[in-house]
Structures are given as structure tokens and as C-alpha cells.
């Protein structure tokens, strides 16, 4: 393996353009005749639109058009869909309320688009938007799931009685009930998982261009999966047939899930570009990002974990209300069901699990997948229960976990998943050693001497990523397959282009994928070009989310490159008059094993393209494609340990130490993996300590700017101590498990467990703000 | 985030600025660093039709000492305050406070004049100026006048400034050498306004507090000059009981709003905590200085 091959911490190729300001993002696209769109948005969380008067706005300087929802209907533009069918336990399908790209009768959240002003400049569009007069009749709003399901609550959609989308369940109810009824110990908790705003650095943006000569549309957009966007825009939203629509996702500055979905703004820009026959650009400002990017999490759960007299888990029963917001976003239905409840077994042997999930509409921003999507909610729930159980039993939290760890693989949980491999003791050992767990009591005493409270918290997470195989997800209701495609094109001079259906928006694919080619073909990574994000270049692909690009995307590339190698070996064998089986490709050369016969890689490529001397019947050229559909999910797992110090006077929590020991299987580029873990932990600590999304009772988002919504800063975070253990994934040829979300999944319970350890009791919710921690200390003191 | 339309003016002198402001009355606003005003304009919560940029007026800049008084021009940025050797030795609390305002980018633009004239209870300088007994120099169409910082603030965004008036400079009596000082600010994150903050200036003689001045930030609609709390400290060695009593006195005048930083109850408690901490820190500095 050379210095640029897989397993090496190769410096990211793409960073030169990013750190020198030369990235090319959607908002950088400049086109002749470009117009600018500004959306008029609802100031009310729930209201009926009585009328919209656009006449004054249309008369404003520089205004090209002012369009409303009724015109969308007139042009038969389709409503937005949720692409994953989930059925209630009674067999009825989920209740999807109509989600038009611009509201024409009722608005259901503050920020929902009701009209668009298109003008010569952004400023003129913004000014004219002030002149659009919308007459609303305000309706009662509801923001809390527990309120929304009560009789008499305001109703959002006629399709969904009691605002309930579905009442879904998984697992064996009677067996679980029986286990809990007969248990020696039952730990019961109410557990909230706070709503988060995703906040990628680059706000969403769209540029739509219509070519009237060819009746062809092009969309540049901030998307994690441009092919899926094109499919939806064509098949469901009636924008244009796929062959008349090109979707390009150029450099994208972070997504975290929020850029998976096709949003109303993209639909409207495309539709408007054709209508006015001029290109249209829209770029969200940060306030719009807060009000329109799909939010994440927002669960309210009741959970019971039952143990036998020997502290072995015998059952887990969970009821969760999942807040969907005002409409069902693209994958919203799957997040609190198949991505959540299927992971409730955690790292533990739990014979009986039963979970019910009620999906509920509220007058808030739609909720969908956000870094981790369902798995952080599952990990938080089970890891909080384990911590509380250990405290209740007076046992060490590590020992209680070890006693219940799954140690035999494959392991079938009662909630669909078959864990393929893992070594949970190994990662817990590594994390405890790294943080010097044994030395904690001394550190606690030192803190106490300063008047501070110190706590340590363990979190042993498991998650499922690289969602697959297509057949399985199809049977669970997914509207798409979850394979990946790749094409490897060797040029006549031996350089390589890789076309991938994965999409990089911060993950470093241009480097990691090139490392794979470098390992296989022995060429330098600078001779490899990674091409992605353009439906005209890459034939099809499922995009990047759910930590799937290593496990699924790279496996597709490997499959394609193996086909290229096979053909190259045939050509080389023919040219060097050797047996095909003796040909090895190594270090940029193609050799005959056991001899000194060899030729440069570039000459084999050239021979393929001259076609002068190829084996009989062989087609010229050296280019192969592959579709790869994995056999199972992959199961990254690990142990995180956080150590916190709390100032009891102010309630401020400082994270002193944070250790992660992850098992991601084989690492392709350890530096990039570590970066992913850092980012994930930062987001997890943000969730645990800082990021609270707050609505008023009437549906105004109070935390709609960085002044109010507290994102983590460097000084809120310790220097992370990152370790790895390895059980290679048996489910894909590279043994990869996926590392993009683990940090955000494993860290919140570690932090909250550490805080509860410091406090000596359980009563704290995320985000554990100084106010909440202070109250947790002082109300407890008052109670004692 | 695009502001509405406005006419931009850039006068070169105070007289010219006052004249432009007088000509447009309510529809004009002075602009200093813009880090409070421009965000409001982008949210269209402020929609001035005339913006009078004070950046071109050199007489509004600079820090100087005139006898026992330090004069700071309104257009002096927070970054300038941090860099000043004169302030570092004579009024180190200004540097300590400035370093706790926002972040370096904002401090490079934000001015002391804008900070004290803004009337936002979250701004840190108004409380500090009350603690220091500063005087604001105002200039308007009807001439010049001075107002004490302790009399200037009437409500959130509501000050003694008349329409068309600008604040030109601030004069501050220099506290005695060896004084103790502290600006204790509790905040959620870098770049946030205070959950609660307290400014303290004191002097000690024979281990006892000889003079003491305390003011609170962001625990009411205006900064609060905490006279009673300061009074309680005089003649004491700032023992635990006194610190507690002073904290209670600070709490009793606090009336914070509930917001993202915490409940009203919590923020009032924190006014007590930061007051006690600021006093303790100031005392230990005074002892070291003595
Ligand atoms: C993210 C962020 C965080 C911040 N955090 C803090 C913080 O923690 N603490 C803090 O104190 N501040 C904070 N600020 C505010 C910052 O310090 C501002 O710069 C300051 O409050 C205002 O100064 P300015 O020069 O920018 O004033 P401007 O924004 O230019 O003006 C503010 C107001 O004062 C008026 N005005 C300005 N100059 C004069 C004058 N000479 N005479 C009369 N009226 C005048 C303006 O018309 C306007 O109404 C923060 C700002 C931001 C953006």
C-alpha cells in the first residue's frame, strides 16, 4: 500500500480550493439575465389565507413576476411527498396532509412560503415582497406533541384525526408486557430528545435555468443527492421529464441531512424559470434557514427497562411521540420508526422489546433526518436507562453494561436488525483506559476541593448505517432503492475518472475515493478525478446520507474498478503473451508474475484505446460501471466517556475530558475519519448542552438566529481523545462501517450521564443549560 | 437579510453631522460601528431613511487624559480600547470589559459611543460607565450638554438622547491608583450578551473597603447602579456574609426578563452570584495592588 493508498491519512485534495475561497457553490453561479427570488412567508403558525394581493408588488421597480400558490395549482405542480410508506399497527397507511410548494389555502408554520417575488436584484425582490398583502384569518396553533394529540386540540390536516400521522409499533407486545410484569426491577423514565436546527454553514440555494429552444431545464442546488431530486421533480412534482431536466449539486457546504430533501423553493424556482423564461436564483438567508431547513429529533418518550434479579435485561417497552412539524418531509416517516426503534436494543442482549411510535403534526418547521436520524434518539434512550439503572442498583455503570453486552455475532435483535459483528468490551476497555477511569475519584475530589461538582458518563452506542439492501428497505416501505452506482473511466494516457452517485458536502470523497483507485491501480491520487453531483455526468446515484458513501459508494467503485482490472489483465496478457492469471497490477505497472516482463499501466490503457492489438472479439476502451447493493446495514459501535465539571453557583457545565473509542471497521483515511468524529461530537455536545429550539405557545420560533440559538463554539469543547478498535464489516468488500454520524449519536448520552453523575440524580433535560442545571441542583437541595 | 432603502450621509465634522440629523429629524439615525444598528435594519426592525455615518469625523476618535479625567471619543472602537496603554494602566476595567464583548471581528467595528448610546440593556458598557461615574457629552442642533451615565438610561432603547443629538465623547474620573476592579460576566457562549454581569470598582484601606461602586448589566430594562449593595460593603473586609448580603442587595433591584439565557428567577440569582464574585475579585486585586 503506497503513501496515497487506503488506510493512509492523506491530506484532503479538495481543501486547497475550499480554504483559498475557490470553492464553487450554488450561490456563485452567475448567468446572463439572472433574476432573484424572494419568498413571502407566513408570519403565523396557523392561519387561513383569505386573499393575497400582489398588485402593488407587481408595480414596484424591477419586479419581473409575483407568483402565488394558486398559480402552482393551475400549472399542476405536484405537492411535496413523503417517500417512505409507514403503516399504523392497525394496518392503515400513514396520513399525509397535502404539502403545496406555496400555501394557497392554509399556512401551518411560521416561515411557510405563500408567494414569491422575482425581480432584477435581490434588494428589489426583498423590497417588493413587503408590498405583497396577505390577508390571514388566524387559527389556533399547537406546537407540543402532547398537546396536539389531546381532544379539542387545533387540527392541522383533515386527513389526520387528532393530528396523528400513524400509530406504529414494532416488537412483541405481549411477551414484553409479560417480561416487565414479572421483572425483579423496572427502571422507568420520561425521556425527551430536543429539537435541533441543522445549521450547515452554507445556506440552501437554488438556481434554475430554462432553455426554451430545447424545452430543457437545469437546476443548480444545494443537494446531498441530485439524482433523487431529479427523480422527485420529474415523477412527482411535474416539473419536466428526467431527460429534460439536469440537476447539478456543485460544491455544497455541509448538509447534515437538511439537504437531502427537495424543498418548495427549488420547485418554485424551476417552475418560475420556465414561466418567465429567465433564470431564477434564490439563496436562503440565515433566518430563512432557521425557519425552513428541516429540523431534527423532537421526541417525547416514556421508557421502561426491566431486569431480572441478576441485573440481566429482560425487556424494554417504549412509547414515543415524534413531532413531525406541519407537514411530512421527504423521509420523515422512516426516521422515528425504522431508523429509531430498530436500534433500541443498543449493545445489549434484550430478549423482548416493544415500541410504539405516534407520529404527530404540529405547527412547527417540518422535521426529518438530521445527522444520525433516529439513532441518536435510540442511543440516548437506552443509554440514559442503563445509567439510571446502574445508579438505582448501586452498580458501576460499566459493569452493568458489560453484564448485558452482546458478545456473540451475528446477533438477531427482537427489532429487525441482525448485528453482523462487533466487540463491545474492546471499545469500552479502550475508552476507560484512555480517560483513566480508575483515576476519576481523585479528580472528583480535586474538583470538590474547589467547590465544583465533577461527573463521569459512559455511552455505549450502536448505530446502523449504509442503509440497505434495497429489497429489505423496499419491503419496509422505502420509495427508493439504497444501492449505489459507480463508473471508472481510464483515459488513453492511464489517468482515471471516477463517476460516483455519492455526493460530497464535506466528507472528503475526492480524496478517499482517489485513495482506493491509487491502491488498486497503483496510480497517484492526482491522476484520479472524482466526478459527482451532476445528473448529466453520473448516470444515477442515491447520494450521501446515513454514512453510506464509504460502505456503499466505495463498494460500487471497487466493483467497477475490479471489472476494469479484469479487462486490463486480459489486454496485458495478450500483449505480453502471458497467462491472464499471472498478470498483476502494481505500482503503476502491469507485470507478469514470476518474470521480469512488465509494461507501464499507461501503455495498457493506450492499447485499449488504439484498439490495434486487442484479444479477438474484445471491444476497445477501458471503462466499466457497477451498481452495488449491499447485503446488510453496517453497524458502527463504540464507547464514549465524558467527564464534566459543574459550577454549582451558576449551573455552568464544562466538558473537561471526552474520549471516544469507535469501531468503524477498516479505516480508509484515518485523518478524515477523525475529522468526522470531531464534528459529530461537537454537534452532540451542542445538543446536550446548548442547542435548544424554543417555540412560543402560538408557534413563533424564538430561537431563529445565532443570537438566540446557541451553537457550540471551540471554547465550549475540550480537545477530543479519539481511539479506534476494529472488527471489519463482513457485509462489504472493504470492511467499512461508516463514521459520519457516530459522534452525534454517541455523545449526548455521555454528556448527560456525566451531568447526572455529578448531580447525583436524574432530573435534567437536554439541553442542560446553566439554568436547568442550576435548578436541578437547587430544587433538589430545597427538596432535601 | 437585506435592509430597506436609505440615503447614506458621511459628514466630516460634528457640526455637519448635527445639521444633517436636524434636517431629517426622526427619519435619520447616526451610524457608528453598525453592529447593533445594521442587524436591526437587515431584520427590518429599524428602517431609517437617512443614515448618518460618523466614521468620517476625526474629532470623535481617540483616548486622552486631561488631569484626573480620561476622555474617550465616541467613535473609539472596542478594539482600540483593548489596545490602549493609557486605559490599561489607568482604567484596566475598560479593557477587561471590552474583552468580554462579542468577538474580535465585532470589537473591531463596534464603538463605545454606539454601545452606550444604543440603550440596549444587553450592552456591557452602560453598566460599566455607571460604575465609573462617567459623563456623556452630547451635541445637537440646540447646542451641547452633558448627562451623567447614571441618569441617561430610561428604558430599553430609550435614553436621554434627543432626536438629532449625537454622543460625542465620554469623560471618566480616574479611580485612585491601586484600586480594585472587576467585570464579571456570565454568558452562554462567546458572542452572547450577559445572562448577568456586574462591574465593581473599589478601594481598600487597612483591609477594609474604603470606597465602592457597583453596577449591573442586563438584569433590567436599563443598567442598574447598585448603590445599596455598594454601601453594604463599606468598612467591611468583604467577608462571606458581606458578599452574600451585597449579592442579595443586587438581586433585590434586578428585574430580568426570561429569555434564552434562563428564567427570570435564575437570572436574578445570577445577578447575586456575579456581584459577589466581582467584589471578591476586585478586593483581591486591591489587596495585591496595595
Ligand atoms: C454577535 C454580536 C454580539 C455582540 N455581543 C455584545 C456583547 O456581548 N456586549 C455588548 O456590549 N455588545 C455586544 N454587541 C454589540 C456591539 O458591541 C455593538 O457594536 C455596540 O453595541 C454598538 O456599537 P456600534 O458602534 O456598532 O453602534 P451602531 O450599531 O452603529 O449604533 C447603535 C445605535 O446607537 C446609535 N448611535 C451610534 N453611535 C451614536 C452616537 N455617537 N451618538 C448617538 N447615537 C449613536 C445608532 O443610531 C444606533 O441606534 C454584539 C454585537 C453582535 C453583532
Image: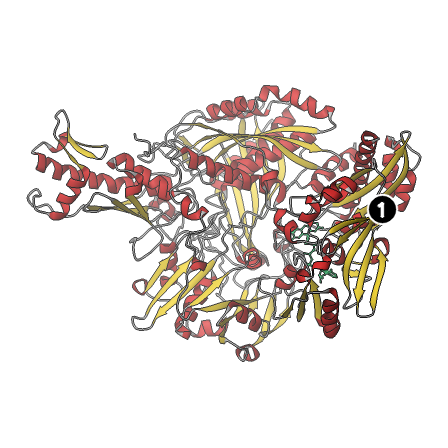
Name the residue beneath numbered marker 1: B68
- Residue at the (39%, 69%) spot, across then down: A32
Quadrant position of the N terminus of chain A in the picture: top left
> Visible in this render: residue A692?
no
**Residue B224 left/right relative to B32:** right
**Residue A732 left/right relative to B248:** left
Q: Residue furthest front?
A: B67
Image coords of residue A374 (percent x, y): 50, 44
Q: Nearer the viewer, residue A735 or B88?
A: B88
Q: Does the residue labelled 1 lie within 8 Å of ligand 1?
A: no
Image height of A549 relative to A728, above or below: below
Q: Which colour scheme is used?
A: secondary structure
Number of numbered discs: 1
Circle 1: is it few (<14), some (14-19), or many (20+) Cα within 10 Å?
A: few
Q: Which of A174 and A16 is in front in this view?
A: A16
Location of residue B165 (image quadrant): bottom right
Image coords of residue A566 (percent x, y): 18, 38
> Visible in this render: residue A110?
yes
Quadrant position of the C terminus of chain A in the picture: top right
Location of residue A702 (image quadrant): bottom right
Q: Quick check: which quadrant has ligand 1? A: bottom right
- Residue at the (74%, 55%) spot, across then down: B73
Q: Nearer the viewer, residue A206 or A462?
A: A206
Image coords of residue A140 (percent x, y): 65, 63
What is the chain identity of the residue bearing mark 1? B
Image height of B40 relative to A390, above or below: below
Location of residue A595 (image quadrant): top left
Amino acid at each position: 500500500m503506497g503513501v496515497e493508498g487506503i488506510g493512509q491519512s492523506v491530506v484532503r485534495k479538495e481543501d486547497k480550493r475550499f480554504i483559498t475561497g475557490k470553492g464553487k457553490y450554488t450561490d456563485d453561479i452567475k448567468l446572463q439575465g439572472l433574476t432573484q427570488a424572494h419568498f413571502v412567508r407566513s408570519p403565523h403558525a396557523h392561519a387561513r389565507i383569505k386573499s393575497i394581493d400582489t398588485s402593488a408588488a407587481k408595480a414596484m421597480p424591477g419586479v419581473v413576476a409575483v407568483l402565488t400558490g394558486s398559480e402552482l395549482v393551475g400549472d399542476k405542480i405536484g405537492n411535496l411527498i413523503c417517500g417512505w410508506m409507514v403503516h399504523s399497527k392497525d394496518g392503515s397507511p400513514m396520513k399525509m396532509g397535502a404539502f403545496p410548494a406555496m400555501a394557497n389555502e392554509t399556512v401551518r408554520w411560521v416561515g411557510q412560503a405563500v408567494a414569491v417575488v422575482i425581480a432584477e436584484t435581490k434588494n428589489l425582490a426583498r423590497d417588493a415582497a413587503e408590498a405583497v398583502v396577505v390577508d390571514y384569518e388566524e387559527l389556533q396553533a399547537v406546537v407540543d406533541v402532547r398537546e396536539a394529540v389531546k381532544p379539542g386540540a387545533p387540527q392541522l390536516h383533515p386527513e389526520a384525526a387528532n393530528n396523528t400521522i400513524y400509530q406504529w409499533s414494532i416488537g412483541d407486545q405481549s411477551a414484553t408486557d409479560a417480561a416487565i410484569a414479572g421483572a425483579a426491577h423496572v427502571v422507568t423514565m420520561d425521556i425527551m430528545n430536543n429539537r435541533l436546527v441543522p445549521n450547515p454553514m452554507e445556506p440552501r440555494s437554488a438556481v434554475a435555468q430554462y432553455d426554451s429552444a430545447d424545452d430543457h431545464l437545469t437546476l443548480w442546488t444545494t443537494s446531498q443527492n441530485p439524482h433523487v431530486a431529479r427523480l422527485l421533480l420529474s415523477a412527482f412534482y411535474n416539473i419536466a421529464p428526467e431527460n429534460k431536466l439536469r440537476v447539478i449539486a456543485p460544491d455544497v457546504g455541509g448538509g447534515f441531512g437538511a439537504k437531502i430533501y427537495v424543498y418548495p423553493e427549488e420547485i418554485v424556482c424551476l417552475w418560475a424559470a420556465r414561466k418567465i423564461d429567465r433564470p431564477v436564483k434564490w439563496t436562503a438567508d440565515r433566518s430563512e434557514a432557521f425557519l425552513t431547513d428541516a429540523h431534527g429529533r423532537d421526541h417525547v418518550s416514556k421508557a421502561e427497562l426491566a431486569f431480572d434479579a441478576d441485573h440481566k435485561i429482560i425487556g424494554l417497552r417504549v412509547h414515543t411521540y415524534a413531532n413531525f412539524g406541519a407537514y411530512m418531509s421527504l423521509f420523515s416517516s422512516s426516521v422515528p420508526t425504522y431508523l429509531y426503534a430498530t436500534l433500541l436494543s443498543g449493545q445489549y442482549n434484550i430478549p423482548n422489546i416493544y415500541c410504539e411510535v405516534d407520529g404527530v403534526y404540529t405547527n412547527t418547521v417540518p422535521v426529518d433526518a438530521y445527522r444520525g436520524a433516529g439513532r441518536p434518539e435510540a442511543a440516548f434512550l437506552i443509554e440514559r436507562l442503563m445509567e439510571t439503572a446502574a445508579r438505582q442498583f448501586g452498580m458501576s455503570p460499566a459493569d452493568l453494561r458489560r453484564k448485558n453486552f452482546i458478545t456473540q455475532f451475528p446477533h438477531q435483535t427482537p427489532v429487525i436488525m441482525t448485528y453482523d459483528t462487533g466487540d463491545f468490551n474492546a471499545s469500552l476497555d479502550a475508552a476507560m483506559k484512555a480517560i483513566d477511569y480508575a483515576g476519576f475519584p481523585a479528580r472528583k475530589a480535586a474538583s470538590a476541593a474547589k467547590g465544583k461538582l465533577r461527573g463521569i458518563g459512559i455511552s455505549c452506542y450502536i448505530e446502523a448505517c449504509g442503509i440497505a439492501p434495497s429489497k429489505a428497505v423496499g419491503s419496509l416501505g422505502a420509495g427508493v432503492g439504497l444501492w449505489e452506482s459507480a463508473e471508472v473511466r481510464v483515459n488513453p494516457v492511464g489517468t482515471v475518472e471516477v463517476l460516483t452517485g455519492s455526493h460530497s458536502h464535506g466528507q472528503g470523497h475526492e480524496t478517499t475515493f482517489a485513495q482506493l483507485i491509487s491502491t488498486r491501480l497503483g496510480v497517484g491520487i492526482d491522476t484520479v478525478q472524482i466526478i459527482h453531483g451532476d445528473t448529466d455526468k453520473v448516470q444515477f446515484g442515491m447520494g450521501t446520507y446515513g454514512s453510506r458513501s464509504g460502505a456503499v459508494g466505495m463498494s460500487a467503485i471497487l466493483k467497477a474498478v475490479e471489472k476494469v482490472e479484469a479487462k486490463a489483465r486480459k489486454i496485458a496478457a495478450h500483449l505480453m503473451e502471458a497467462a491472464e492469471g499471472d498478470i498483476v497490477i502494481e505500482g503503476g505497472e502491469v507485470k507478469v508474475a514470476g518474470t521480469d516482463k512488465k509494461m507501464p499501466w499507461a501503455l495498457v490503457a493506450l492499447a485499449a484505446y488504439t484498439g490495434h492489438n486487442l484479444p479477438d472479439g474484445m471491444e476497445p476502451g477501458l471503462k466499466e460501471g457497477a451498481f452495488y447493493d449491499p447485503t446488510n446495514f453496517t453497524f458502527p459501535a463504540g464507547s464514549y466517556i465524558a467527564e464534566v465539571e459543574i459550577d454549582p453557583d451558576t449551573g455552568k457545565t464544562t466538558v473537561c475530558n471526552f474520549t471516544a473509542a469507535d469501531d468503524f471497521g477498516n479505516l480508509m483515511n484515518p485523518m478524515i475519519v477523525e475529522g468526522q468524529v470531531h464534528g459529530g461530537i461537537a454537534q452532540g455536545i451542542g445538543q446536550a448542552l446548548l442547542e435548544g429550539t424554543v417555540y412560543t405557545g402560538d408557534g413563533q420560533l424564538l430561537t431563529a438566529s445565532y443570537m438566540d440559538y446557541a451553537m457550540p463554539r471551540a471554547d465550549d469543547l475540550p480537545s477530543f481523545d479519539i481511539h479506534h478498535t476494529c472488527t471489519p464489516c463482513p457485509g462489504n468488500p472493504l470492511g467499512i462501517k461508516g463514521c459520519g454520524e457516530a459522534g452525534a449519536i454517541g455523545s449526548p448520552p455521555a454528556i448527560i450521564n456525566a451531568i447526572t453523575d455529578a448531580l447525583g440524580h436524574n432530573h435534567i433535560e437536554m439541553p442542560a443549560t446553566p439554568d436547568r442545571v442550576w435548578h436541578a441542583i437547587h430544587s433538589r437541595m430545597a427538596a432535601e | 437579510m437585506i435592509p430597506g432603502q436609505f440615503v447614506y450621509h458621511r459628514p466630516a465634522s460634528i457640526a455637519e453631522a448635527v445639521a444633517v440629523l436636524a434636517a431629517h429629524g426622526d427619519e435619520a439615525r447616526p451610524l457608528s460601528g453598525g453592529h447593533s444598528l445594521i442587524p436591526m435594519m437587515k431584520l427590518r426592525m429599524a428602517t431609517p431613511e437617512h443614515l448618518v455615518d460618523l466614521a468620517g469625523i476625526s474629532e470623535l476618535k481617540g483616548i486622552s487624559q486631561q488631569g484626573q479625567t480620561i476622555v474617550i471619543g465616541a467613535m473609539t472602537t472596542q478594539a482600540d480600547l483593548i489596545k490602549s496603554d493609557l486605559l490599561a494602566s489607568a482604567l484596566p476595567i475598560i479593557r477587561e470589559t471590552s474583552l468580554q464583548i462579542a468577538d474580535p471581528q465585532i470589537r473591531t467595528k463596534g464603538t463605545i459611543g454606539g454601545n452606550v448610546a444604543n440603550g440596549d440593556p444587553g450592552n456591557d458598557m452602560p453598566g460599566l460607565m455607571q460604575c465609573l461615574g462617567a459623563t456623556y457629552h452630547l451635541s445637537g442642533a440646540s447646542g451641547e450638554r452633558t448627562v451623567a451615565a447614571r441618569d441617561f438610561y430610561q428604558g430599553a432603547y430609550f435614553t436621554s438622547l434627543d432626536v438629532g443629538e449625537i454622543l460625542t465623547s465620554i469623560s471618566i474620573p480616574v479611580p485612585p491608583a491601586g484600586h480594585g476592579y472587576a467585570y464579571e460576566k456570565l454568558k452562554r457562549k462567546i458572542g452572547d450578551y450577559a445572562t448577568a454581569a456586574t462591574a465593581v470598582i473599589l478601594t481598600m484601606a487597612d483591609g477594609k473597603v474604603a470606597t465602592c461602586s457597583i453596577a449591573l448589566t442586563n438584569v433590567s430594562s436599563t443598567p442598574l447602579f447598585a448603590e445599596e449593595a455598594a454601601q453594604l460593603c463599606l468598612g467591611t473586609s468583604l467577608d462571606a456574609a458581606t458578599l452574600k448580603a451585597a449579592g442579595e442587595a443586587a438581586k433585590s433591584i434586578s428585574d430580568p426578563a426570561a429569555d434564552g439565557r434562563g428564567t427570570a428567577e435564575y437570572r436574578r440569582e445570577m445577578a447575586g452570584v456575579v456581584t459577589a464574585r466581582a467584589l471578591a475579585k476586585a478586593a483581591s486585586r486591591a489587596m495585591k495592588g496595595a
